[in-house]
């Protein structure tokens, strides 16, 4: 079942205290900046001296409420409530070098993976798209063009440093139909129920502490007839290839991280977090459990990456 013939009909939530009503937000964005984006970014972080690692005042909903419970951060076991902060520090550290590192680490292949996911999205003019954990905006930039002036794209991320890079890049590229919103994928709290035709999360889900909560939040904000695409590292299907891939990830990536971004630890986390992420079949059942229907996946580059797709009927 697909949304090919569905016309976008945004559910508008009226808020009497605002003179701008967004059809996508459960409460209006802070006002005053173009599309409301600047203030919504500033809200997310406590101000810090330039260059220091900020103490993150993460968006509402970042705390899992799992006091005393543990989870994994790469191969480390950490308190569930500390993981969001640790992930935030990783992406704050790599934000300015994120795009170049992606090209180097994947030999540019991440662009093909993303293109494949975009082709599976069925995106059409006039649609409303949310790119979750969208970071520097690779997908949002393409969707901005595809949906056209009657459509609308939200680039959302939990991390202000990543979102700042994405916002500058998309505004420089003339994307005038994009909003930039700090939001935790676990709750997607700023967004109203049933408000998007298409959701994407690209290389973001493995960083989220409570993935089931995130999938449920995605189901909530997706319109009936809409689709979710999850592009993520997955489990290589060919065992000898897997050994080579392990060697590359645990040896070469941290060295590249050190040389280019002066940060080997973040790239060690990358390699570890990939190994801890649910495999193809597990993620498919998690999507089904969250309510998505007709779920399937496609392996790319021998299962190094997979695109999962699910629909809300
Ligand atoms: C590897 S980057 C992917 C960026 C972009 N989607 C891409 O494909 O290039 C992962 C992104 O997930 C974001 N992220 C991590 N945890 C998150 C959460 N709980 N909610 C929203 N975004 C999160 C990070 O801040 C980071 O920007």
Image: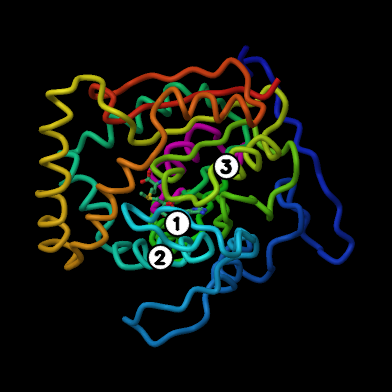
What range of the chain is rendered magenta? 134-153
Tell us which disc is closer to us: 3 or 1: 3
Place residue 51 in its image quadrant: bottom left
In the rendering, at what x and y percent does residue 268 appear? 22, 55
Where is the N terminus found, in terms of image quarters?
top right
Queried on whether the Cβ of the residue with tag 2 lies below 8 angstroms from ligand 1, the answer reads: no
Q: Is residue 227 above or below residue 185?
A: above
- The residue closer to the viewer here, 293 or 127, is 293
In the picture, measured across the screen, residue 156 lies left or right of residue 107, that is right
In the picture, measured across the screen, residue 13 lies left or right of residue 124, that is right
Residue at the (30%, 40%) spot, across then down: 275
- The residue closer to the viewer here, 237 or 61, is 237
Mark 2 lies on residue: 86
- Between discs 2 and 3, the one toward the N terminus: 2
Q: Secondary structure at mark 2?
A: helix
In the picture, measured across the screen, residue 12 lies left or right of residue 307, that is right
Q: Is residue 176 above or below residue 226?
A: below
> Magenta stretch: residue 143 in it?
yes
Mark 1 lies on residue: 171
Tell us which disc is closer to us: 1 or 2: 2
> Mark 3 to mark 1: distance in Å?
17 Å
In the rendering, at what x and y percent does residue 100 appear? 21, 53
Tell us which disc is closer to us: 2 or 3: 2
> Mark 1 to mark 2: distance in Å?
29 Å
- Residue 52 visible in rendering: yes
Numbered badge on residue 130: 3
In the rendering, at what x and y percent does residue 167 appear? 45, 58
- The residue closer to the viewer here, 164 or 157, is 157
- Between discs 1 and 2, the one toward the N terminus: 2
In the rendering, at what x and y percent does residue 304 appear? 26, 30
Residue at the (69%, 20%) spot, across then down: 6
């Amino acid at each position: 079942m697909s949304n090919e013939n569905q016309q976008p009909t945004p559910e508008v939530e009226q808020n009497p205290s605002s003179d701008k009503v967004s059809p996508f937000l459960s409460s209006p964005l802070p006002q005053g900046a173009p599309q409301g984006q600047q203030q919504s970014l500033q809200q997310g972080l406590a101000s810090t001296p330039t260059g220091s690692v900020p103490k993150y005042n993460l968006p509402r909903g970042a705390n899992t409420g799992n006091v005393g419970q543990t989870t994994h951060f790469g191969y480390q076991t950490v308190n569930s409530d500390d993981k969001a902060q640790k992930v935030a520090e990783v992406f704050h550290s790599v934000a300015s070098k994120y795009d170049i590192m992606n090209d180097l680490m994947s030999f540019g292949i991440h662009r093909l993976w993303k293109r494949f996911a975009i082709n599976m999205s069925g995106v059409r003019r006039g649609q409303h798209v949310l790119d979750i954990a969208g970071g520097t905006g690779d997908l949002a930039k393409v969707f901005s063009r595809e949906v056209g002036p009657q459509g609308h794209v939200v680039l959302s991320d939990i991390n202000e440093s990543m979102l700042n890079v994405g916002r500058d890049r998309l505004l420089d590229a003339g994307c005038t139909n994009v909003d930039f919103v700090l939001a935790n994928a676990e709750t997607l709290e700023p967004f109203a129920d049933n408000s998007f035709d298409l959701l994407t999360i690209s290389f973001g889900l493995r960083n989220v502490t409570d993935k089931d909560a995130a999938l449920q939040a995605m189901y909530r904000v997706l319109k009936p007839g809409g689709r979710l695409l999850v592009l993520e590292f997955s489990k290589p299907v060919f065992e000898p290839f897997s050994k080579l891939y392990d060697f590359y990830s645990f040896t070469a990536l941290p060295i590249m991280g050190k040389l280019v971004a002066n940060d080997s630890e973040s790239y060690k986390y990358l390699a570890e977090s990939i190994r801890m992420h649910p495999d193809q079949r597990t993620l498919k059942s998690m999507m089904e459990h969250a309510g998505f229907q007709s779920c399937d996946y496609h392996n790319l580059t021998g299962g190094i990456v997979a695109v999962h797709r699910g629909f809300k009927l």
